[in-house]
Image (spheres, rainbow, N blue to C red):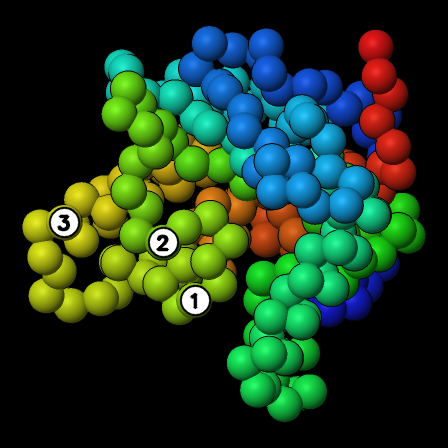
């Protein structure tokens, strides 16, 4: 994720943000940052209407007994800034130089921008963080959510050699998530197995299309 997102040609579709809690029986939400007391986080997950419908389509591709667990969607500026500051501090505590911190943080947390024409991806309502769960809980994806390591790279288990049986199961779980989401039109983010985009600037750049979601500063509560 770019430290400073450059303004890219985009048009605003006007689609509203919609809550995901009651969208589908195959989609559940666990607002991760709300439950971890991040400043400004809300007890709900939201996406733009078009992205939400594509999420429903993706959920329908999962095998019986499995469902999506959405951890984060639309993110207000206050939350983005809090996450950026927390991540920056964590990297600094590891003894990284300023350049190292800048390089590493750019992979995982976008610079907090409230510019509607160059917004942080989550601020558009077109970015979603999620995993797959079943009756026994979350599927094993090899790392935890927001675990900023090399193993968090979406295709890490595809390129690793001599995988154990357990690691092959992790690889297959990631494949399932990525396939369901990309077939529904989302773009997978290379550095984070849990992050997918639709309609925003990263999606537009990856698909050579004009972004249709600009930044949204607040959600309308119905």
Decide if residue 18 is in sight here: yes
Tell which circle, 1 or 2, labels the residue nearer the N-terminal end.
Answer: 2
Picture coordinates of residue 121, whole percent (x, y): 71, 48
- x 79%, y 40%: residue: 40
Quadrant in which the C terminus appears: top right
**Numbered disc 1: secondary structure:** loop
Q: In this view, does 22 lie above or below 179?
A: above
Left or right of 47 in this view: 159: left
Using residue 152 as the reference point, say whether residue 201 is left or right of it: right
Residue occupied by mark 2: 143
Q: Residue at x 63, y 79 (%)?
A: 92
Residue 124 falls in which quadrant of the image? top right
Mark 1, Cα crowd under 10 Å, few <14 / some 14-19 / many 20+, is few
Residue 10: tell me if it is visible: no
Earlier residue among tags 1 and 3: 1
- Residue at x 8%, y 50% (from the top left corner): 165
Residue located beneath label 1 in the image: 149
How far is disc 3 from disc 2 in space, using C-alphas? Answer: 13 Å
**Marks 1 and 2 in Cβ contact (< 8 Å):** yes
Q: Which label was assigned to residue 66? A: none
The CA distance from mark 1 to mark 2 is: 8 Å
For mark 2, give the secondary structure: loop
Image position, residue 42 (x, y; %): 73, 31
Tag 2 or tag 3, which sits nearer the N-term?
Answer: 2
Quadrant of image for the N terminus = bottom right
Badge 3: residue crowd in 10 Å (few <14, some 14–19, many ≥20):
few
In x, y percent, where is residue 38? 70, 46
On screen, residue 51 versus residue 143, left or right, reads right
Which residue sits at x=58%, y=86%? 96
Q: Residue 166 carries which label?
A: 3
**Is 89 on the left-hand or right-hand side of 152?**
right
């Amino acid at each position: 994720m770019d430290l400073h997102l450059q303004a890219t040609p985009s048009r605003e579709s006007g689609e509203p943000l919609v809550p995901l809690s009651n969208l589908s029986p195959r989609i559940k939400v666990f607002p991760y940052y709300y439950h971890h007391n991040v400043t400004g986080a809300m007890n709900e997950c939201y996406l733009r209407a078009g992205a939400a419908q594509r999420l429903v389509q993706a959920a329908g591709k999962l095998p019986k007994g499995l469902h999506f667990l959405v951890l984060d969607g639309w993110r207000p500026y206050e939350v983005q800034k809090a996450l950026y500051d927390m991540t920056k501090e964590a990297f600094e505590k590891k003894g990284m130089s300023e350049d190292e911190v800048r390089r590493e943080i750019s992979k995982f947390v976008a610079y907090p921008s409230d510019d509607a024409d160059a917004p942080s991806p989550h601020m558009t309502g077109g970015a979603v963080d999620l995993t797959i769960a079943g009756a026994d809980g979350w599927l094993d994806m090899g790392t935890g959510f927001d675990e900023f390591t090399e193993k968090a790279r979406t295709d890490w288990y595809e390129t690793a050699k001599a995988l154990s049986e357990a690691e092959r199961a992790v690889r297959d779980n990631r494949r399932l998530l990525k396939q369901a989401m990309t077939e529904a039109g989302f773009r997978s983010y290379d550095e984070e197995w849990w992050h997918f985009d639709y309609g925003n600037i990263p999606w537009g750049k990856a698909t050579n299309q004009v972004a249709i979601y600009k930044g949204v500063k607040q959600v309308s509560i119905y």
